[in-house]
Image (cartoon, rainbow, N blue to C red):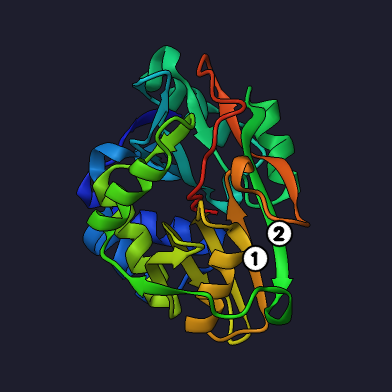
Amino acid sequence: MEYTRSVREDVPRLRRLWKEAFGDGEEFLDLFFGTFYRPEETLVGREKGEPVTMLVLAPTGFWAGGEERSLPYVYALATAPGCRGKGAARGLLNYAAGLAGGEGLCTVPAQESLHRFFASAGFREGLVTWEGTYSKEELPGPGGEAVPIPAEEYGALREELLRGTPHVTYPAAWLRFQEEVSRMSGAGLYRIEAGGEPGCAAVERLGEKELLVKELLCPGGTLQGGGALAARLPGERYCLRAPGEWAGPGGELRAFGMIRGGSPAEKGYLGLAFD
């Protein structure tokens, strides 16, 4: 097995690997590989020259103590069915860790079995996030508003709101990726006015009746921010994620992500997860 960065000629095979692993449709694959794919950020394991395992290493960082350090985010780890269970993905993670050096890696496993896999590959639990799920009736009535904003404005407001909170930071291209994924689902990125203070939220619609607020930064009240979003985005169930300092009643704090290496991010806030 040879581990390398990808090249553009790999894209047809990478699309097949991605689709086999995650089942995403052509529209999503066109979005990622047509707009956001960067060969240098996608790592592959090759067997006889052909990619059989892949991951995307998003160039995220971690801000704490007044400085920002690199903390790349492992996304879209996928292996061809015939090569699973043979160490190919673990070898690719080792290659990614070598590229990251002492700064380490972070990720958000999509299911419990993957937590066990990443733990076996040297990752530990960390990146605490609060999460709560509410019916529309459990959220406050309209006492604020939610207005769509572009990724650039969202990123600036996000950093302003998280000043003083150790947190994962995202480059502009990945915030635009989240904006497009949210838009494709029927939602978006929003500026919120609730409780007399500004906030922001990244929302994806999971179905006609359920919405995932992947990040809700609302100093005026997390549930109040959820209520403003519910007034704009009709549904029956709303899953809200927020930093622990803004936890609402109900829900729970939990280690949301996993970390490998020397980053001091165990108790930091991750926020936007590409889970």
- The answer to which quarter of the image holds residue 168 is top left
**Vertical order, 238 against 40 (above or below):** below
| Residue at the spot of label 2 | 132
Q: As drawn, is 275 to the left or to the right of 174?
A: right
Give the side of residue 100 with respect to residue 225, left or right: left
Q: Which residue is drawn at the image coordinates 64% and 72% (left, top)?
A: 238
Whether residue 18 is visible to the viewer of this picture, yes or no, is yes
Tell me whether circle 2 and circle 1 mark residues in contact (CB < 8 Å): yes
Rendering coords of residue 195 (x, y %): 51, 62
Q: Residue at x 55, y 80 (%)?
A: 142
In front of the other: 8 or 117: 117
Q: Quadrant of the C terminus?
A: bottom right
Q: Of the residues shown, which amino acid type is indicated by label 1?
A: Cys
Q: Which mark is residue 239?
A: 1
**Number of residue marks:** 2
State the image coordinates of residue 188 (x, y, percent, origin top left).
39, 71
Q: Amino acid at mark 2?
A: Gly
Between marks 2 and 1, how big is the CA–CA gap? 6 Å
Along the line of sight, which residue is nearer the eye, 144 or 178?
Answer: 144
Q: Nearer the viewer, residue 17 or 102?
A: 102
In this picture, is 226 found above or below 60? below
The answer to which of 146 and 82 lies nearer the viewer is: 146
